[in-house]
Image (tube, helix red, strand yellow):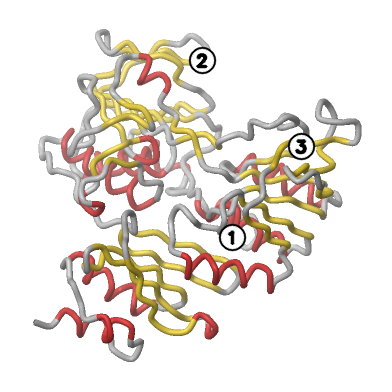
Amino acid sequence: MQADVVIVGAGHGGAQCAIALRQHGYSGSVTMIGRENEPPYERPPLSKEYFAREKTFDRLYIRPPHFWGEKQVELVLGREVTAIDPAARRLTLGDGTACGYGTLVWAAGGDPRPLSCPGSDLAGIHPVRTREDCDRLMGEIDHGVKNIVVIGGGYIGLEAAAVLTKLGCSVTLLEALPRVLARVAGPELSAFYEREHRAHGVDLRTGVAVVALESESGTSGGRVAAVRLADGSAIAADAVIVGIGIVPAVAPLIAAGAAGGNGVAVDGFCRTSLPQVYAIGDCASFACDFADGAVMRVESVQNANDQASCVAKAICGDPQPYHAFPWFWSNQYDLRLQTAGLSTGYDETVLRGDPAARAFSVVYLKAGRVIALDCVNMVKDYVQGRKLVEARISPDRARLADANVPLKELLAP
């Protein structure tokens, strides 16, 4: 097996890279290798519309399955890359198959971070990362699973809890930190979502540590029946969802000599330290322009897609440094959260609107400058706030806090 461009990973980044290559007129051979047996599909709806059964899986395909053949993109599915020989430009797959490449694009994403406590290998413990993960849990719910413990108060855990309550399950959500969303948002947003989930019946507990998962016979063998906490108490559980982040899937790259640690390091053009090897998406660590050059991984569809387009342009002979505006979203209950920018390193927040009205924005500032916004049911703030971040505005606090003042007015000289 040989291709001019080999893309490892069939998620958003990998799919967009193949699409962008053809859009930019690339005529060489393109092969995409994916670990799952499905053609590329959207991941965010898994913990939202798909899990809630509001969308069937066929509506999640990034492109119809026949699209890839029509664009002469070869899909190699159900296979995993286990080793890279950068000198020979050759990959080794799990079944021993070799695949040569001219240029390699690593878009493998990450794997759900597992629990490390006793009992973490019991049956009934689920990540929410793939279609198979969701189908397995949905099947259990169909067969009577009702008491579910969600471990992790990030967006995946909160979104799963919201859907599970809608499906009639009894949900307990456990977060080790003092508040949910502690790593990505300010206290105002955390407090709001904690209130919302409790109002919808979720038993949400913060500052709690899980020390073991137990079956009826203990911590080894069988199916999970309880979650044991550090204070000695136990919570009955028919099933457990684990949403405590991901581990970047970069082991073959690092073993081959690529620079990196928490992900694989890439430069401003998404190039790794290995010759003719790019990396994009959740697994790529880069100096982010919208975080004052801080080196980080950005786990979002926007980042994966925009880095993919950056790489496609470079391969097609039009290299342009990566400089894309970061944005995110989350749907929980009837709440639409839209985030513009990165709040990393903020030193001040300004609240616009009233959280009790379930429509408000949290504006994040650093040294007086707007660096990000979290907008709950506030679409105009999100759209206009992006411009404040891009313009590096240092607005008057009173006007910024006045929800009756459109944010676009703060752009005026």
Coordinates of residue 233 in the picture (x, y in percent): 81, 47
311 sits left or right of 348 in the view: left
Badge 1 crowding class, 10 Å Cα cut-off, few under 14, some 14 to 19, many 20 or more, is: some
Q: Which residue is mark 1?
A: 49
Kind of residue at badge 1: Glu
Residue type at the position of mark 2: Gly
- Please tell me whether residue 184 is drawn above or below residue 70 in the rendered image: below
- What's the amino acid at mark 3? Leu
- Label 3: few (<14), some (14–19) or many (≥20) C-alpha neighbours in 10 Å: many
Above or below — where is 189 with respect to 181?
below
Question: Residue drawn 56% across and 59% down?
Answer: 179
State the residue lying farthest toward the bottom: 404
**Chain-order first, disc 1 or disc 2:** 1
Front residue of 198/51: it is 198
Secondary structure beneath label 3: strand
**Residue 324: image location, x then y, percent:** 23, 53
Q: Determine the CA span between mark 1 and mark 2.
A: 33 Å
Going from N to C along the chain, the mark reached first, 3 or 2, is: 2
The residue to which callout 2 is attached is 94
Q: Quadrant of residue 191?
A: bottom right
Task: Work out which quarter of the rendered image holds the C terminus and state it.
Answer: bottom left
Which residue is outermost to the front? 231
Q: In the drawing, what numbered circle is on residue 213?
A: 3
C-alpha span from label 3 to label 2? 31 Å
Residue 403 in percent (x, y) is at: 35, 87
Q: In the displayed image of the protein, which residue is found farthest to the right?
A: 217
